[in-house]
Amino acid sequence: MNRRHARYPFFESAREAVEAAGVDLGELVGAGDVEETDEEGATADDGGAAVDEGDAMVVARARERVETALSEGHIGTNGETGMHRSTRIELLSYPIARILVSLLDEPMAIEAYARAEASTARQRLAADLPESAPADGFTGGGLGEELGSRGGTAGADDRLSVHDLLGEFGLGDAIEGRDPFLVDVSVYLELARDLEGQDWALVERSLSAGRVPVDRSELYALLERAVADRVADGLPLSVPEPIADGLAEPRDDIEGMLADEEIPLAFDRVEPAQFPPCVDALLERARDGESLPPHSLYALVGFLGATGMDAAAIADLAGGGLDRETVEYQLAHVRDDRGLEYAPPSCATMDAYGDCVNTDERCDTVNHPLSYYEAALEDVGGD
């Protein structure tokens, strides 16, 4: 197992690394409570069969992976692209997270989780293979710096190239060239199917000999869809009962997060004057032209989408500070084609990211921005 496996756990080589390690998922999910394990004197040994603290941390990271995916639209820890310091824990959390999502038995959760994994992968690719990197191989910001910070260097197993990346998804023959890349038109149409904006329309592209030119950032946008498809492939899994039982507690916690009946997700009108202070502040930042960080953008669009606003209305409310394509992409994380929605970030999450600002007396009585909005609407009457 190496850092590239942990950073891109959906790679075939990462799956093979997990298989080669001979990890028993039944033993791993039975890790239980860390304190109880310590009392029994079990030792932490990556190669041993004993249930150890490391295994419990794998399950904890898997739970965090799913919860963050469904509430924030990414799977990072301590940031959108952050990873656990242990390669083993980070990598093994991925198959456990896929099991947890399967146990939720909710198609929207699977799609949202896959999109979140793909979103984080795209950000990591931008760091590891930036615009200035040669197409035939580079170990950049994210991967290289993480290795260096641990006293290591990027070896052959950690090196990442665009060629490797395309080969991973069987696209080596379908995508040629080196920035611009020339994408087979059928592949382009398949991978661009969810990308909004006129720039992605085929009529806006210089189609030649059945190929569509894209720059590197556009290539990563297309590959984001390929990652989401791979993550979702085979889900939901058929989970053996012993493993399902071992994951009952984190599954119940995630289901509780999704089914919190105290959080309203539907309103009959939109009244910006009743928005909570945190949302007002985010709107003001957007109107001032600030490029909101991903967690703030997700929180803002998720809240506004939950009030019933569509992408055009949200972009208009932001006074040009948000483009419609970005808004539509963010809405896809909280809403499916049936109109169902997941709640945007809670007050606790907003506070953790520094977005809980200008609090007032009502803030002390609620734990979610949507609950604030509901109470404010009730105070002015008509809801």
Image (spheres, rainbow, N blue to C red):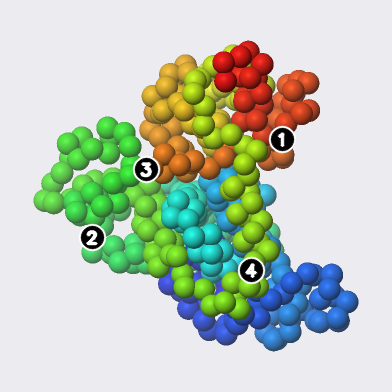
Residue occupied by mark 3? 337
Q: Of the residues shown, which amino acid type is indicated by label 4? A: Leu
Is residue 105 or residue 100 the one in the foreground? 105
The N terminus lies in quadrant: bottom right
Q: Of label 2 and label 4, which has the lower sequence position?
A: 2
**SS at mark 3 in the image:** loop
Q: In 3D space, how far apart are the residues under numbered discs 1 and 3 (Cα atoms)?
A: 28 Å
Residue 225 lies, in percent from the top left, at: 37, 52
Query: Mark 1 touching mark 3, by CB under 8 A?
Result: no
Question: Could you give the CA–CA distance between mark 2 and mark 3, rounded to whole angstroms?
Answer: 30 Å
Relative to 125, is 276 on the left or the right?
Answer: right
Please provide percent x and percent y for residue 317.
Answer: 48, 18
Please give the label number shown on residue 367.
Answer: 1
Q: Label 1 sits on what residue type? A: Asn
Marks 2 and 4 sit apart, C-alpha to C-alpha, by: 40 Å
Image quadrant assignment for residue 88:
bottom right
Which residue is at 23% across, 64% downward?
Answer: 173
Q: Which is closer to the viewer, label 2 or label 4?
A: 4
- Give the residue type that dot 3 points to: Asp
Q: Residue at x 71, y 67 (%)?
A: 57
Dividing the picture into quadrants, the one containing residue 361 is top right
Q: Few, some or many C-alpha atoms within 10 Å of disc 2 (few <14, some 14-19, many ≥20)?
A: some
Is 212 left, or right, of 130 in this rendering?
left
Q: For the residue labelled by badge 4, is the local secondary structure a helix, a strand or a loop?
A: loop
Residue at point 44%, 32% (across, down): 327
- What is the residue that sits farthest to the front in this orientation? 382
Task: Say whether disc 1 or disc 4 marks the residue closer to the N-terminus.
Answer: 4
Nearer mark to the viewer, of 2 and 3? 3
State the mark number for residue 247.
4
Is label 2 in a helix, a strand or a loop? Answer: loop
